[in-house]
Image: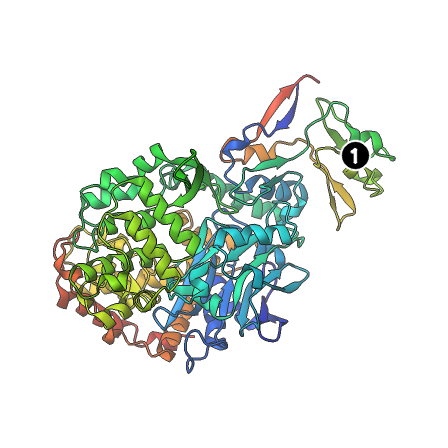
Amino acid sequence: MIYKDYIRVLNVDMASERIYIDERQDLMPYLGGVGVAAKLLEENMRADLPPLAPEQPIVFAIGAMETVYPVITKVVAMFISPLTGELGESYAGGRMGMTMFQAGFDAIVITGRAVRPTYLAITDTDVVFRDSRVFWGTGSGEVGRHIREYEQDQGSKLSIIRIGEAGENLVRFACVSVDRYRHFGRLGLGAVFGSKQLKAISLDGNRSMPIQNYAPYFKVMRELYKKATESGLMSKYHDLGTPVNVEPLSAIGALPTLNLQSGTYEHADKISGEEFASAHLVRKLACVGCPVGCIHIGSYRRTFAEHGYEYESVEVGYDYELIFSLGSYLGIDNTRDVLELIEEVEVCGMDAMSTGVALGWATEALEKGLVGLDDTLVDLKFGQSQAYRKAVRYMSGAENEFYRNLGYGVKHASSVYGGEDFAMHIAGNEMAGYHTGYAAIAGAAVGARHSHLCNGGYSIDQGLKDPDIDIDDMANAILEEEVERNLYNSLIMCLFARKIYDRDTVIRALSAIGQELTDEDLSAITKRIYATKLRIKKALNFDLSEVRLPKRFFETPSMHGKLDEARTYEIIERYKEMIAEMEAFT
Amino acid sequence: MAKILRANEMSKCLGCFACMQFCACVNKKNHSLQKSAIRIKAPGGISDRFVAVVCQGCSEPPCAEVCPSNALTPRKGGGVNQDPKKCIGCRRCENACMGHAITYDMEEHKPIICDHCGICANFCPHGCLNMQEVPD
């Protein structure tokens, strides 16, 4: 906790509706954020039980510099992923970090299953278990409005995180929505909520937190604010936002298209960042404490009756990852249909990337006759957004056996129906929007949570002049970044700001809020956190040697041309050797 | 010429709350947004439009009129000056402000009063808040 020598943990048992608060000095060597969350997950998880067992914990943590510096906005959630069966880790911004900070909780651990649908109302002075039977079955936007009303929020700063229908139905990649436009998207936290009958959490806090060393603090704060707003390092995230990447990635052959049958999309120009901005962009928003404002809101008009000129205006948040997964990946060639699909996925409360990749696989499985129309219920074809909209509903509603299986992810679905070669997941997590080369694929395979953000392999690929670099060098580059990101994620900064916060800046910023740490200390912290993750993965029986990648990764040329399958596995094996001794680090 | 704060471009607001953070930081030496004299609200949640609830800089400030101890006095150019030593914490000013711009600091037992210092405008990244010159 800021200015204290302990981490303040709120423990919540949903079953008994009891809470207790710990002040944990022993967690200080983990700094905050992902470090604290990983340790708490390791302590509380039950490796002997399935991911959705009532005993399994959900851990949230804020970072060591949460909210007090610019762009330090994220909250980490850790859990056992019902999608991969192993380490679950996901980040979201919005108002949640600020409200946890002001409520005075560095971490929240939730265990047990509520006797009835419940939402938790957490403030600095109380934790209330509210009956949510009436909200069970409501969409993620609707339930937010009800809770805001009930908590009598005047629109100041309440944070509301909630699940939609998909989470209730235990879709393995259901997400948790945060303040409407942000998400704990990946790896199925929404299903873990659902398994606990936990519909939502509202958070608010009004603690006074006097600044202890004003002059040095303000100096660093002002300097960082100027860097974030004036240096130009972050302007691309504000201007067109992440969709600026759609066309360039397609041009270099790295934009996954038509279930990765291609890395280039012939209609990329029709779903580009420029196209979204000129046709739909109506607003930009920011997470609390971020002067950049990367959240892009697009609006489109929808009719809800065939006669009588009945229309509504729909506003949807859009980003690169959603445009890839619900756009190029499914052959949707216009911005409006992409927005409409995003909206559908948002209301149901699913991870957009996994949803798109699952639909891409289902489309080909139907085309190849592995499944029939009596399974898919609609004629799934690339480019047909209305069929996909229905399929999203079927998936979220677990409509039939096929959609229930699809809701377990493409790894599972392809093990039932076949088509493993084009079921595009990496160790059970559906692929992200970068077919850049070896580092993207091997990086996600070795990454602790199999996300493209574990070590940014796609970024390593894009920085390479020679894609055939030595296997050792490649594995090393991935490992270095994987370990270093534990520092960002213990603070918890938005990864967009990583160029602003170099090591020296982090040391000065921490010092100004009373944490004196050296460069060596920070290195030890990153290793300690990574070791914790490795121990968790080991306890959950994850073995890198068992990772099997779908063939299509090696058939469809990447931005660095066709990739060699054997070489990819060699990188993974080399990485495995490198980390063999690391889990013992304390 | 005196300057007063105008929240006159709020349609551009990102909801980053930098104004609140810097107001609380500079004026109250506190990390808590509760200490800020300006508050950004979206009455219907984040999908709603943001409004700034802040001192409007009245030329005949009702808050000063009801202050029984002269802790609040009219300021040149609009708004009020606050002398915390004279404040007895009666909270009359809070009710008198029709713009709901005054909140009460439960810790200090004093109202939180905007003194139009311009810090919020200075750190607004999107040009929503501006300092305007007004005749004294």
Residue B31, image x, y percentages:
61, 49
Q: How many marks?
A: 1
Can the viewer see residue A147 in this picture? yes
Residue under label 1, please give it: B96
Residue A110, image x, y percentages:
54, 70
* Chain of the residue where label 1 is placed in the rendered structure: B
Residue closest to the eye, A118 or A71: A118
Q: Residue furthest top?
A: B135
- Disc 1 residue type (three-letter): Ala
**Image quadrant containing the C terminus of chain A:** bottom left
Residue shown at the point (61%, 75%) measured from the top left: A16
Can the viewer see residue A495 in this picture? no
The image shows residue A503, relative to residue A425, as above or below, that is: above
Residue closest to the eye, A463 or A525: A463
Question: In the image, is A389 to the left or to the right of A474?
Answer: right
Residue A227, image x, y percentages:
44, 41
Residue A408, image x, y percentages:
33, 68
Q: Secondary structure at mark 1?
A: helix
Residue shown at the point (64%, 64%) measured from the top left: A127
Q: Quadrant of residue A6?
A: bottom right
Q: Residue furthest front?
A: A307
Q: Residue furthest bottom?
A: A48
Residue shown at the point (47%, 67%) measured from the top left: A194
The image shows residue A239, relative to residue A81, as above or below, that is: above
Residue shown at the point (64%, 45%) measured from the top left: A154
